[in-house]
Image (tube, coloured by chain):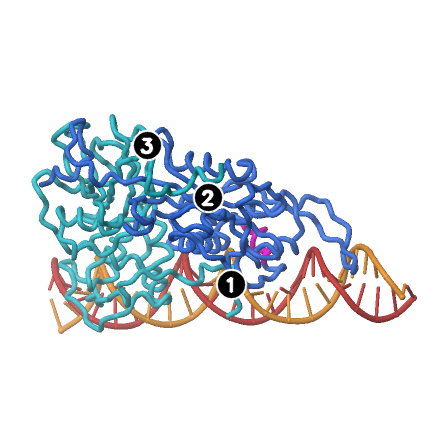
Chain colours: A cyan, B blue, C orange, D red
DNA sequence: ACACGTTTTCGATCCTAAGACGAAAACCCT
DNA sequence: AGGGTTTTCGTCTTAGGATCGAAAACGTGT
């Protein structure tokens, strides 16, 4: 019995439960002060008129990572995707009617200073007020938002939502929109700086119409995901 | 073009890249002072004699979660599996020769006080000195160890490796084995207690043969995974 | 021009949690 | 009874985040 659960050899007997595999991505961006998700409206059944995540079938020579990038290229310019990561597998047998399709879900991030051209059936929707979604795509999207929110706390993932240069206030608004609550600009500045994630460019920009001190411009020191090391609580001997 | 990437309707044209799906689990346990993984030795090609993770094909009416639990039941008593979580999807086209099989990998934990009966071809192997493994199973296992190590820091996941009651020293040895470095019993006690993850049972056990103060017995307050809330660095307004 | 409101920025202080260390407690054995 | 052992507890130190307020640098209205 221990050999029943093996990746089978060339001669195969049971193909009945070979399942289709798709990749899906919750692609989010902060626009107009709130977190928006990229959705396209289905034309054909199942679930016509409902809104779905971008994605599609896994090709024969792809990893799930290369597949989701290929599929997203049909929606947005890939260079605008600053971060893509695996979320989870969604595999309820009934998640797609009449078919057995397992989905690998991804989270994708786009910086707020880019406004990709979208196909006609595609639009941004606020994550906190989604339209009627197809399949289990709302669940996937909410899982993605949770992942984003926790990673904003303990990584430098803000770089993937922020423009190359920004003021602390802009960054605060960005974090506030993504997290769903107001954060302090002072603390955001200090916390990210102390971690080495943020640095001043030296430039400043003109004050707003209502006056005020002209803000300084900052940038993220790295565009690669870095985890704050102090979260290793029971630390190894330095 | 926006409709090419949809879970297709009843009439289907392209089934060429329908891929098989398997579930695999890195099941680990602390025994004899180090972290061990459950592996079984393959008899047939591909990769005969190499050691493989438990798992198998995804059935038609299962989620990946129920599937991995079913498959693991063939190896160990399911009630001994105190924690199972999704790790990641492994999908390199060449990861299994002559076949396209996508794997959903899991991490499984077994408390150190249980010694499951194993099939003849199955044995525990130290994770830091693995035998020759089949496919990409070593990579999966190492990813599982990393997940475990980080979760030991910021969750109460120790409950899944520990017996129902234990002394602080036993717990320290457990954490040391899983983390790969010595941790301080004093701090481990205080950190987990302050988080509310640990509580004293009131009982004590006899001192060891070499004397010493009789240690007190502790238990984890919860057997559900709980994340330390202080890791929300930019905290919401309480 | 000057006072005032506004916004950003910086510094000082407080608080909490974790690491390090040593003393005290409670046992063993001789 | 005394010395060795292990556990346990308390205190000190360190570090990062929270809070607050002052200072800087700009607009606007009078």
Residue B145's disc number: none
Residue beneath disc 3? A17
**Residue B215 position in % (x across, y down):** 72, 53
Q: Residue at x 20, y 51 (%)?
A: A69
Residue B104 visible in rendering? yes
Q: Residue furthest left?
A: A120
Label 2 environment density (alpha carbons within 10 Å; few <14, some 14–19, many ≥20) = many
From the image, tell me which residue sits under label 1. A235
Q: Which label belongs to residue B54? A: 2
Look at discs 1 and 2 and give the one toward the viewer.
2
Residue B101, position as x, y percentages in the image: 32, 44
Distance between mark 1 and mark 2 Cα atoms? 32 Å
Q: Secondary structure at mark 2?
A: loop
Measured as percent of width and height from the top left, residue A119 is found at: 9, 43
Q: How far apart in space, not on screen, are marks 3 and 2 (Cα)?
A: 19 Å
Using the image, determine if residue B193 lies above or below residue B62: below
Chain ID at mark 2: B
**Main secondary-structure element of the magenta-colored stretch:** helix
Q: Chain of mark 1?
A: A
Image quadrant where one finds the N terminus of chain B: top left
Q: CA distance from mark 1 to mark 3?
A: 45 Å
Ranked by sequence position, the earlier of labels 1 and 3 is 3
Magenta span: B188-195
Crowdedness near tag 3: few (<14), some (14–19) or many (≥20) residues, C-alpha within 10 Å: some
Above or below — where is A101 with respect to B236?
above
Q: Are marks 3 and 2 in contact (CB under 8 Å)?
A: no
Q: Is residue B190 magenta?
A: yes
Residues packed near mark 1 inside 10 Å, few (<14), some (14 to 19) or many (20 plus): some
């Amino acid at each position: 019995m221990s050999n029943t659960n093996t990746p089978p050899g060339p001669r195969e007997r049971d193909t009945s439960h070979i399942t289709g595999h798709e990749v899906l991505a919750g692609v989010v961006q902060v626009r107009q002060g709130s977190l928006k998700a990229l959705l396209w409206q289905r034309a054909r059944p199942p679930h016509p008129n409902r809104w779905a995540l971008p994605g599609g079938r896994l090709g024969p020579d792809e990893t799930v990572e290369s597949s989701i990038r290929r599929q997203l290229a049909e929606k947005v310019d890939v260079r605008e995707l600053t971060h893509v990561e695996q979320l989870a597998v969604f595999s309820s047998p009934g998640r797609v009617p009449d078919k057995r399709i397992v989905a690998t879900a991804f989270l994708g991030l786009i910086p707020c200073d880019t406004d990709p051209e979208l196909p006609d059936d595609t639009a941004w929707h606020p994550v906190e007020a989604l339209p009627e979604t197809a399949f289990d795509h709302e669940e996937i999207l909410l899982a993605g938002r949770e992942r984003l929110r926790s990673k904003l706390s303990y990584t430098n993932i803000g770089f993937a939502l922020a423009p190359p240069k920004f003021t602390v206030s802009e960054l605060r608004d960005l974090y506030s929109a993504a997290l769903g609550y107001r954060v302090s600009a002072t603390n955001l500045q200090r916390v990210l700086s102390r971690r080495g994630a943020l640095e001043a460019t030296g430039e400043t920009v003109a004050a707003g119409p209502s006056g005020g001190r002209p803000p300084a411009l900052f940038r993220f020191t790295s565009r690669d995901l870095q985890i704050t090391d102090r979260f290793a609580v029971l630390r190894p001997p330095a």
